[in-house]
Each structure stands twice: as structure tokens, then as C-alpha cells.
Image (cartoon, helix red, strand yellow):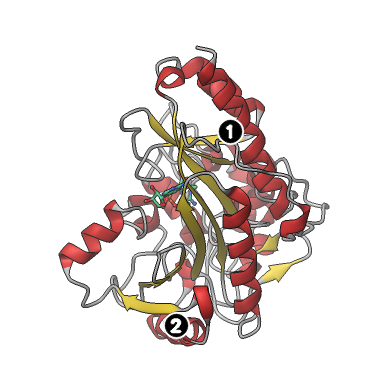
Amino acid sequence: MSLTFPTFPKNCRSLLCQYLTPEIFEALKDKTTANGYTLAQAIHSGVQNPDSSIGVYAGDAESYTLFAPLFDPIIKAYHGFDPQSRHYSNFNPDALNADNPDPEGAYIVSTRIRVGRNLADIPLGPAISKAQRNEVEVRVSQALSRLEGDLGGSYYPLQGMRDADTAQLISDHFLFKAGDRFLEAAGLNRDWPEGRGIFHNNDKTFLVWINEEDQLRIISMQHGGNIGEVFSRLARAVKALEQSMTFSYSDHLGYITSCPTNLGTAMRASVHIKLPKLGSDMKAFEAIADAHHLQIRGIHGEHSQSEGGIYDISNRRRLGVSEVQCVQDMYDGVVALIEAERSR
Ligand code: ADP
Ligand code: ARG
């Protein structure tokens, strides 16, 4: 499909509209990956949603090389990571220096760490077929059913789930929401709800989302601020799943994900934290967050608002930093935020 250069509104700030030049567009517009993914598909979400912060999605690992003249500057702008750099992993809980930053439980409500993963032999969600998506669901849910001990649990497909159960899982922060317009325009909601679902253990401290933005989102979470425990459980779970699945990984970009913000570790380590005083001085709040490479989200995840002075604080960088460093970023920033809140 040939396409004409998209027009973006004047106030557009997305990385897509900053880095998609007419020259890059011309050079890439007729290229197609082996899975049939095109530039038009890669940019569709950002064209449809000019208020995107990024605006692009990959359909497969090859998208990151074939469309590199567009993806590379976006990756550099988000992660500060150069095209010739190499990603290194360190998922060793013993290397983490992050005690509970709030042992009295005055600020931190809960801690959650997730990583995204995709199977090496199947296209990413934006380019996946219905049959391939269903195959992912079968392969991943079977692998999960073999986990034992505190990681053992059950898989609940979205299709056929009672509306009340779905709503409860979402409002308790365990399940993804339906109808995200950015994912919709990226083709990630095709055939909804078929092929999607959630696995969790009895305590809901270990959960896996199947076929949302990435084929797997592997999640460890619990009440309070014991970051070490959450990280150790996640490291153990990922290791166990690697015994039966091969995830898409490159020495350059680390774990391959559909959104370039998740490349590398694909890790988002977050706390839900009460910061009502800082929340009424967003300028000071954002300055501390920026200095510590943190992202501020609302209480119901991305693109949601804070409620009752509670915020979702997480690491922003995921590529070119190890898993341990992602959590360290979050920990150091949270310590600084608690100090600032206390002194107000
Ligand atoms: P992701 O973390 O996968 O990028 P979202 O930002 O949409 O996606 O968050 C997914 C869900 O996880 C939301 O319901 C959000 O409130 C919940 N969540 C995130 N961090 C925490 C946390 N520290 N404690 C409890 N729930 C959390
Ligand atoms: N595509 C959306 C945007 O550009 C989300 C980007 C980051 N978030 C994500 N869930 N991948 O604003």
C-alpha cells in the first residue's frame, strides 16, 4: 500500500511527528517485513491519535531494523540509547540494594513489577493473525499450568468471563482494561476478547496477562513496600517460564516488545504511593521525578488520574539499563519523594 505523508496538528508533540521527516517517509513507505508489516501500520496509532507521546508500534523484531531510520531516533529520545549500543541484563535479586523504603507503611500502598515478553517464533501483537494469537494463548497457558508452589495458579480467559468478575479484576488493579484507543489503532485489539486472558496464583501476587499489548506481561505484586520480595518472585517466575518458552531477544535491543518504550528489560517497577502534599505542587513533584528518571501515572494505570493523593510512580528507562537498575531507579526516586513529602 502506498501512502501519503500524514498531516499532524500544529500542537502535536509525539515522537512520531518529531522524527517522521518526508525523507524518512519516502525511504520507508514501500518496505514490508517478512510478516507483511508496513510503515503505514507502524505509524497508524500515532496518526490517529496525535496526542500520543510516542505514536509507533512494531509488528515484529524485523520492524526495528527495517524501519530503523524512524525507530532509532525515537528509541534514543525515550531511553537515551544509541543505535550502536548493546543491552545488558542483570535480573539477579542478590544485586539489588533496595530495602523497604517505607517500613511503617505510611506512604506506600503496594508494589508491582512487570516485564513484557513475546514468543521468538510468532509476530508481535500488531501483526499477529487470529490463529497465531490463539496459539500463543494455548502455549503460554499450558506452560503456566505446569508452575508449582506459590507460582501455581489458574488461567481465566477473557472470553466467557462474567462482566462483574472482569470489572472487579480491573478495579482491583489486576487486569488490563478494554478499549485503549492507542492499542486499538495499532491493531492490538483485533478479535477482542478472543485469545486474551489472565493467569494468577491464589494470592494474586503472581499474574500473567496473555495477548494484551505484548503476548505476555509477567507481573509480581503485593501490598506494602517490600520491593526485594516482589523482584525476587518475578525473577523466579521468569526463569521458570524460560524453561518452556523462547522469548524474542536481541543483543542490541534486549527483549523485543510491540512499543519501543518497553524494549530492553521490558520492566516497569512501580509503587502506589500517597503523596498528597507533593500532589498539590506538581512542578516540584515533576522536578524530583525527572531527576530520578521516574514516570508519574494515575491510580488506574496509564492515562488515568490520581485519586486521594495516591500516584503510580515507576522507572521510565528500560533499555540500556539492567533489571536491577530499573528497580534501583524506582527505589532511589521513591526515597527522594518520601523525603520531600515528609518535609512539607
Ligand atoms: P503496565 O504496568 O502493564 O504498563 P498500566 O499502567 O496500565 O500497565 O497498569 C496496569 C494495572 O496495574 C493498573 O490497574 C494499575 O493501577 C496497576 N498497578 C500499577 N502499579 C501498581 C502498584 N504499584 N500497585 C498496585 N497496582 C498497580
Ligand atoms: N502509544 C501510546 C502513546 O504513544 C502509548 C505509549 C507508551 N505506553 C505503552 N503502553 N506502550 O502515547
Q: Which residue is mark 2?
A: 141
Residue at x 53% of width, y 67% of height: 59
Residue at x 68% of width, y 55% of height: 68
Q: State yes or no: Cβ of the residue under disc 2 lies below 8 Å from any atom of ligand 1.
A: no
Label 2 Cα crowd, 10 Å radius (few <14 / some 14-19 / many 20+): many
Q: Position of residue 286 (x, y in %)?
A: 53, 23
Horizontal placement of 335 versus 43: left or right?
right
Q: Position of residue 192 (x, y in %)?
A: 29, 70
The one of 10 and 226 positioned closer to us in this rendering: 226
Q: Which residue is mark 1?
A: 334
Answer yes or no: is residue 25 visible. Answer: no
Q: Which numbered disc, 1 or 2, marks the residue closer to the eye?
A: 1
Describe the element under mark 1 as helix, strand or loop: helix
Q: Which residue is at the far front?
A: 104
Up-down relation of residue 211 to residue 137 (above or below):
above
Q: Position of residue 54 (x, y in %)?
A: 52, 44
User: Reading the chain from its start, which is encountered first: label 1 or label 2?
Assistant: 2
User: The disc labelled 2 sits on which kind of residue?
Assistant: Ser
The one of 201 and 28 positioned closer to us in this rendering: 201
Answer yes or no: is residue 279 visible. Answer: yes
The one of 58 and 340 positioned closer to us in this rendering: 340
Q: Which residue is at the far top?
A: 344
Label 1 Cα crowd, 10 Å radius (few <14 / some 14-19 / many 20+): many
Q: Position of residue 2 (x, y in %)?
A: 48, 61
Q: Quadrant of residue 93?
A: bottom right
Q: State yes or no: Cβ of the residue under disc 1 lies below 8 Å from any atom of ligand 1.
A: no
Residue at x 40% of width, y 83% of height: 134
Q: Quadrant of residue 27?
A: bottom right
Horizontal placement of 255 versus 184: left or right?
right
**Residue 321, which numbered label?**
none
How far apart in space, not on screen, are marks 1 and 2 (Cα)?
A: 35 Å
User: The disc labelled 1 sits on which kind of residue?
Assistant: Val
